[in-house]
Image: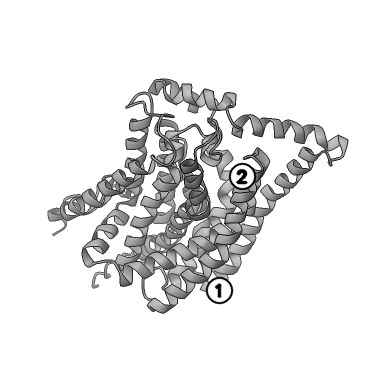
């Protein structure tokens, strides 16, 4: 019997994944370099400068959640490619998929406990357990199924935000007010300006590696499950949209340029004004914890999702019409090594900012942090292509693939000839 053809490699899909993994750093850089409360509150460490406020505003409207959303959509699309590739090679699609998710979950937990607390791999692996069930649905069915996931993902935090707002204004019934006021006080302690939580993070992350790991394996031990409960619904919705966009050929670069342009324009014009309004709402509230929670976890989600689709359309348009062949190749290589680049970014950034490295934690302003992004982006673009010219996989892609197949995979390109 003739061998099955290898699965199709879409350069545009790899390239947009390369942009997404770089965008993830733009979203996460503040969390690498500053106490966690500063991620959503530019006043967490004291009165912010105008450059810091402008950077926060731009990030909230155009970057925060959008790059994670783009990465999530691309995970959904890539899941279909892996499943199709396993089936075409005569392997069990279910066995291949679930083995990959098992090892991805372990990678995620190792990433969380040993490297950085902002892991998304465990969340993706858990979503992947459900994602396989939707693999054969049509574009329309995938989009319809995404709706209840988004409704749950928005509804649960929105209801909590509503109750917190009522507790803040004193309009809750007495029997419900006590618990909500306690939660409100805790949120203000965690997210407000110049709080003990800010000082605690400064001391922790300027400390030793062993003290950081001890903190994650004790006080933060349950956080992966907490983040899963908080973000599973939205992430599943995003992954289902990614599967739909892949099946519609949008993420493979096969639409006409005018169609990409139309989608990008509509998505940005519809999503940007309400997101800017939510940013202004937080500013006028003095970056109050309730305003931050409502804006970032609940109220922004529909507009974040719409802008994420807009980003996908815009990036595809630029890849097709503006990017040179060499730029497309560099981006595609960074995307093919997205797993390695994601984990390497965490290792590099924590080594720069944490106490066991250069110890720059808390000492670089929000706006200046993006210089570190530029440096890491350049590294991704410079090293990914030469590596893939010599090897078939990125280092962590090779390890993941070998573990999932319970067999060492050939690494050097000459071993595949």
Element assignment for label 2: helix
Choose between 113 and 21: the one closer to the eye.
Answer: 21
Q: Residues within 10 Å of mark 1 (few under 14, many from 20)?
A: few
Residue 173: image x %, image y %? Answer: 87, 39
Q: Which residue is mark 1?
A: 140
Choose between 328 and 38: the one closer to the eye.
Answer: 38
* Quarter that holds the N terminus: bottom left
The mark total stands at 2
From this view, report whether residue 224 is shown above or below residue 8: above
Answer yes or no: is residue 136 visible.
yes
Element assignment for label 1: helix
Q: Report the Cα–Cα distance between label 2 and label 1.
A: 39 Å
Residue 283: image x %, image y %? Answer: 61, 44
Q: Nearer the viewer, mark 2 or mark 1?
A: 2
Q: Earlier in the sequence, mark 2 or mark 1?
A: 1
Q: Which residue is mark 2?
A: 283
Is the image coloured rainbow, by chain, by secondary structure, or in one colour?
Answer: one colour
Q: At 80% across and 32% down in the image, what residue appears? A: 178
């Amino acid at each position: 019997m003739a061998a099955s053809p290898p699965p199709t490699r879409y350069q545009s899909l790899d390239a947009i994944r390369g942009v997404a993994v770089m965008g993830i750093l733009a979203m996460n850089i503040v969390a690498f370099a500053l106490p966690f409360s500063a991620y959503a509150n530019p006043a967490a460490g004291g009165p912010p400068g105008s450059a810091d406020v402008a950077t926060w505003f731009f990030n909230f409207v155009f970057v925060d959640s959008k790059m994670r959303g783009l990465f999530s959509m691309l995970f959904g699309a890539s899941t279909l490619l892996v499943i199709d590739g396993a089936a075409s090679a005569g392997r069990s699609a279910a066995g291949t998929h679930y083995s990959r998710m098992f090892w991805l979950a372990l990678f995620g937990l190792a990433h969380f406990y040993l490297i950085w607390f902002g892991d998304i791999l465990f969340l993706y692996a858990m979503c992947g357990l459900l994602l396989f069930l939707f693999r054969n649905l049509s574009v329309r069915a995938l989009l319809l199924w995404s709706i209840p996931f988004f409704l749950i993902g928005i509804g649960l935090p929105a209801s909590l935000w509503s109750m917190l707002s009522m507790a803040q204004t004193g309009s809750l019934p007495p029997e419900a007010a006590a618990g909500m006021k306690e939660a409100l006080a805790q949120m203000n302690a965690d997210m407000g300006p110049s709080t003990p939580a800010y000082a605690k993070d400064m001391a922790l992350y300027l400390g030793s590696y062993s003290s950081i790991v001890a903190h994650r394996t004790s006080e933060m031990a349950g956080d992966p499950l907490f983040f899963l409960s908080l973000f599973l619904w939205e992430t599943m919705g995003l992954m289902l949209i990614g599967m739909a966009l892949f099946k519609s050929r949008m993420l493979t670069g096969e639409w006409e340029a005018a169609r990409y342009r139309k989608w990008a324009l509509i998505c940005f014009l519809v999503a940007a004004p309400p997101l800017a309004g939510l940013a202004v709402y937080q500013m006028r509230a003095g970056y109050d914890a309730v305003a931050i929670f409502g804006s970032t976890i609940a109220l922004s989600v529909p507009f974040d999702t719409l802008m994420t689709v807009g980003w996908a359309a815009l990036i595809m348009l630029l890849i097709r019409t503006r990017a040179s062949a060499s730029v497309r190749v560099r981006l595609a290589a960074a995307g093919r090594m997205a797993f390695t680049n994601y984990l390497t970014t965490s290792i590099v950034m924590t080594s720069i900012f944490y106490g066991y490295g250069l110890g720059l934690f808390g000492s670089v302003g929000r706006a200046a942090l993006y210089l570190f992004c530029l440096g890491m982006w350049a590294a991704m673009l410079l090293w990914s292509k030469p590596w893939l010219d010599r090897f078939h996989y990125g280092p962590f892609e090779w390890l993941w693939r070998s573990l999932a197949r319970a067999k060492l995979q050939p690494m050097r390109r000459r071993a595949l000839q």
